[in-house]
Amino acid sequence: MRLRTIIDFMSPGIIALACGLAAAALAQEPPVKLEVDATDATRKILHAHLQFPVHPGPLTLLYPKWIPGEHEPDGPITDLSGLKMSALGKPAAWRRDDDDMFSFHVQVPAGADRLEVALDFLLPPSSEGFSSGASATAQLLVLSWNQALLYPAGVKASDVKYSASLRMPAGWKFATALPLAGGSAPAVSFATVSLETLVDSPVIMGNYLRTIDLTPGEHPAHTLNLVADSAAALEIKPEDARHFAHLVAETGALFGARHYGSYHFLLTLSDHVAHFGLEHHESSDDREGEKYLTDEDYRNTAAYLLCHEMVHSWNGKYRRPAGLATPDFQKPMKGELLWVYEGLTDYLGIILTARSGLWTNGNFQDYLALEAARLEHTPGREWRPLADTTIAAQLLYEAREEQASSRRGVDFYDEGDLIWLEADVLIRQKTGGAKSLDDFCKKFHGGESGPPKVVPYTEDDVVAALNEVAPNDWREFFRTRVYETAPRAPLGGIEGSGWRLAYTNTVSPMLKSRESEKKYTDMSCSLGFTVKEDGSISDVIAGSPADEAGVGTGMKLLGVNGRHWTPEILRAAVKEAATNASPVELLVENEDYFKTCPVNYHGGEKYPLLERDTAKPDLLSQILKPLTPEPDLR
Ligand SMILES: [Zn+2]
């Protein structure tokens, strides 16, 4: 998964008995029948009907709680509505479990071999979040099957079979990795698959939908499927389509094998859905604003999204930390190895963004500089090792963005980039350039091509595979970087690759686009805070000049040196303060009270960039070099 909000904004005895009996009450054949009626999606309602093959006796049905790839128990149970069960034509009373709010008990009457279940899912209006955030607009819907179904307790998601069908509004088209069995839009039925595959196969549908074949005539097939709130949003530039085709070629060269029958990017372009990406074996649910493909500045701020999610097909879905490879959607996931699952994916994702041409090397460098500088200005590092952000990921994805520098957020993405870059550089140095992290990827994530499967791993497996590529004390390498607190960000990879983190008084194009898109001003490396467009101060770096002057999170910036504040006036004041001894006077409102905070800072504007260190070879440019030529997409 890749989130947009937290990181980009400165920083996203009865049950046991019942379960034991439940399997006995569920018949294994025929498959569970699921009909989803999405014709009311534009009014934010899904209707679903399920038919379970059963035997008489007690049965427990579950609503999916832990959503794969989201690493937290955020199944949207409060939006489950209209739940009714019946058997032999009569209502069957259900009772929610007292301890587990996602669990429903029912008694299947004697003589019944089927249980009918009707339910509605109330799609949220504009809201942030992941797949349970906003997913429907007046023109489109992203359907996550887990939101509109129940499943029997006591069975593995890979063992229980579902036959799903779908009705959508008239005139809509759809795209999904789920194999079709029959029908055509607006009413289709899908092949019988395991519950695991069904939940792993979301569907995008809408009035404006376009499919681009990224690997014409090749097997496996790769398609870029776009659904949007307008026809204009589908107008992808031909060079961008070529870059996405190049991304596909680059993943083949990097991993050497593919673990899917076909791959579908499902890209939703709307200002009214939650913005994030969610990985699946054979597809990715990628959601960005309506202008993502048509506004180059905007696309640059999140150009890595599809690359990141596609990498997950290998790192996250095929190879998965044992603690995250759970048999169903109720067993809690253990996030400790998210520094591999997300950290390595994030590194490979941004590398591939450059290799595929979606970014220039300059874009990559600006991006990495912003991440490194943010992690350098994160005092929360002093109390919280990176490993605690992975173990507590299920809390941190939901944490407020305010004061993230003290709390730390899901830093294993950005810090993963730095740590895996350092691993890449070390391998190249230790083998005299003969090997790189690419060799590790082939060994660890490659193998034989074939249909989706899950091969779990432990930290020992990661260390052993790295040692096969380049012998090193990798356990110690990760122990010091992941499991110990470190006040400074791990910059060894940047420095070892022939570059250094430096600061300039000019805002980089990447930061400028990010500020404009996210509507904030980043003064974290100078005064020590970030401020939103409306003046609210979202983060004050502990120990910074602003912190020492009494500025606090949640205050509202009103004026700078006696004048109504704007980002330009704030930046001009910082520039001027570098030439004299007067403090930068910030007038702030703290709820109903006003105060002036004199900030004694005279270091001038400071924005991060990567600077070339000519004393060392430029390994970074070698890392960013594509492995394949750009395909000719006609
Ligand atoms: Zn991810």
Image (cartoon, rainbow, N blue to C red):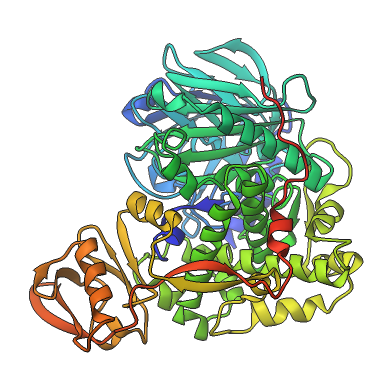
Q: Is residue 414 visible?
A: yes
Q: Position of residue 433 (x, y in %)?
A: 85, 63
Q: Which quarter of the picture shows residue 263?
A: top right
Q: Is residue 538 above or below residue 628?
A: below
The residue at 40%/54% (across/down) is 514
115 on left or right of 193: left
- Total marks in image: 0
Q: Position of residue 476 (x, y in %)?
A: 77, 81
Compare residues 607 and 172 and report the one nearer the observer: 607
330 on left or right of 454: left
Which corner quadrant holds the C terminus?
Answer: top right
The residue at 20%/72% (across/down) is 555
209 on left or right of 420: left
Q: Position of residue 473 (x, y in %)?
A: 83, 79
Q: Position of residue 111 (x, y in %)?
A: 63, 27
Q: Is residue 386 above or below residue 417?
A: below
Q: Is residue 112 visible?
A: no
Compare residues 421 and 187 and report the one nearer the observer: 421
Q: Is residue 58 above or below residue 53?
A: below
Compare residues 421 and 101 and report the one nearer the observer: 421
Q: Which quarter of the picture shows residue 335?
A: bottom right
The residue at 43%/11% (across/down) is 171
